[in-house]
Amino acid sequence: MRSLAILFLAAAFLVACKKRPVATTPVVPERNVPLTEPTLKELNEALQAWFTSRGKAPASFEELAKARFISKVPTPPPGRQYVIDPEKLQVVLK
């Protein structure tokens, strides 16, 4: 009877320790940024984070991407462009 109880506890332990699958969304490891097209809101948040850490606006979106504040340089809608306004410290779509 005792060996049956030990066997039951061992089986319960093995079942409880079974690893569950983890969702695998691709991210940039250093900043945990998803590898998707950044939205205007995300661009502005990245710009604010850059300014907070560096004290000035970045010269380009390439700088933000290289420093991993955004996952990639944004692709604007056809006929428009994203611009960093260093005075207002925001990204605008022109």
Image: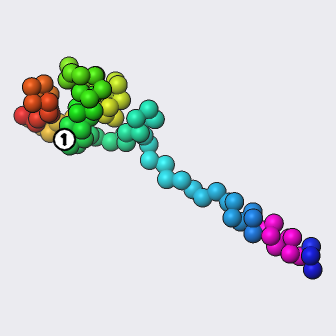
User: Is residue 56 positioned above or below 69 on the image?
Assistant: above
Q: Which residue appears at 31% of the width and 34% of the height?
A: 70
Q: Where is mark 1, residue-wise? A: 40
Q: Quadrant of residue 45?
A: top left
| Nearer to us in this view, 83 or 4 | 4
Please tell me how crowded label 1 is: few (under 14), some (14-19), or many (20+) other residues with Cα within 10 Å: some
Residue 13 coordinates in the image, percent (x, y): 75, 64
Q: Quadrant of residue 62?
A: top left
User: On the picture, is 79 further left or further right than 31?
Assistant: left
Judge whether residue 27 can be spotted in this image: yes
Residue 94 coordinates in the image, percent (x, y): 6, 34
User: Is residue 81 positioned above or below 37 on the image?
Assistant: above
Task: Name the magenta segment's main secondary structure.
Answer: helix
Q: Quadrant of residue 2?
A: bottom right
Residue 35 in magenta? no
Residue 16 coordinates in the image, percent (x, y): 69, 64
Magenta span: 4-11
Judge whether residue 81 can be spotted in this image: no
Q: Which residue appears at 14% of the width and 39% of the height?
A: 77
Q: How many marks?
A: 1
Extreme residue toward the top, this view: 59
Q: Circle 1 sits in a helix, a strand or a loop, which is it? A: helix
User: On the picture, is 11 further left or further right than 64?
Assistant: right
Residue 8 in magenta? yes
Q: Which residue appears at 19% of the width and 41% of the height?
A: 40
User: Is residue 61 positioned above or below 37 on the image?
Assistant: above
Which colouring convention does the figure follow?
A: rainbow
Residue 54 coordinates in the image, percent (x, y): 28, 22
Q: Amino acid at mark 1?
A: Leu
The quarter of the picture where the N terminus appears is: bottom right
| Nearer to us in this view, 76 or 44 | 44
